[in-house]
Amino acid sequence: MIARSLLPVVSFVFALVLLAGCASNKQTQGEKAVQSFESTRMHVADAQKQVDSTLASMGQFQYTGNLNNAFQNYKAALAQLEESSEDAKWRAQAMRENQAKFVENWQKEMDKIQDPTLKSNMEARREAVKQNFAQVKAAAAEARQAYEPFIRGNKDIVQSLSVNLSPAMVPSLKPKMDQTTADGQVLKAKLAALQKQLDNIAHGQSASGNPTPTS
């Protein structure tokens, strides 16, 4: 019973703060919210893949003979990476601005419960989700910040190749590519940390990964 009552509350908050996509008017707010939350988890997973795609496109210059094709693929991957970064900025800001609304909706649901045991379990789960929410906000902000050096490094490489797209240019860019690759790995780690916190909420776990009480 308590698990069923909590799902719409948790998901409703994520619908408010993440606003990921539209759903049919026939769906309940809880159903729409579940889709929004799941869409956000998928977005973070896709963002990690986009980092890999950008790194793979950059790596093509080390072994391909068709520099023009490699350059076009690289620019396309970078454009998609920048879109992912802009989305991450918006989501991090939304989570910062809506934490009060998050807690408010939890409290409204708790006020409706009369059974002391259920109310106690609700309180424990609320505190666990609050911890996760704080962790999500922090992880999202760190991921957003980690985008900046990675994108900047890729842009520098693109700019250099725009001026001189030749086999002789590629070896001179290796130190920059190595640093950008390292920045990409940092970004992937930050995105993975964010994914873990979202997964904790989806699985009903606390910020430490331990299950929260149910009845």
Image (tube, helix red, strand yellow):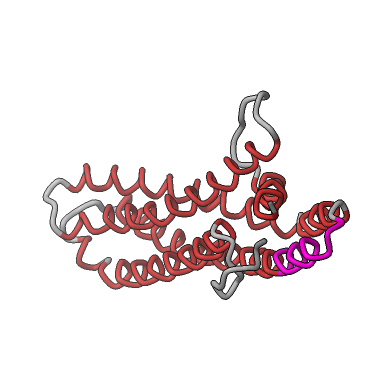
- The answer to which quarter of the image holds residue 33 is top right
Give how far across and how far down residue 114 sits, in percent: 87, 56
The magenta stretch is 114-127
Main secondary-structure element of the magenta-colored stretch: helix
**Residue farthest to the bottom, as pictured:** 208
| 176 is within the stretch colored magenta | no
| 125 is within the stretch colored magenta | yes
In front of the other: 21 or 144: 21
Give how far across and how far down residue 103 sits, in percent: 80, 59
Q: How many marks?
A: 0
Relative to 54, 144 lies left or right: right
Relative to 29, 204 lies left or right: left
Could you tell me which residue is drawn at 19 percent across and 53 percent down? 166
* For residue 35, above or below residue 137: above
Give how far across and how far down residue 120 sits, in percent: 78, 67
Q: Quadrant of the C terminus?
A: bottom right
In front of the other: 42 or 180: 42
Could you tell me which residue is drawn at 24 percent across and 51 percent down? 165
In front of the other: 50 or 79: 50
* For residue 151, above or below residue 189: above
- The answer to which quarter of the image holds residue 63 is bottom left
In front of the other: 146 or 47: 47
Could you tell me which residue is drawn at 24 percent across and 68 percent down? 172
Could you tell me which residue is drawn at 32 percent across and 52 percent down? 53
Give how far across and how far down residue 96 sits, in percent: 72, 60
Relative to 120, 58 lies left or right: left
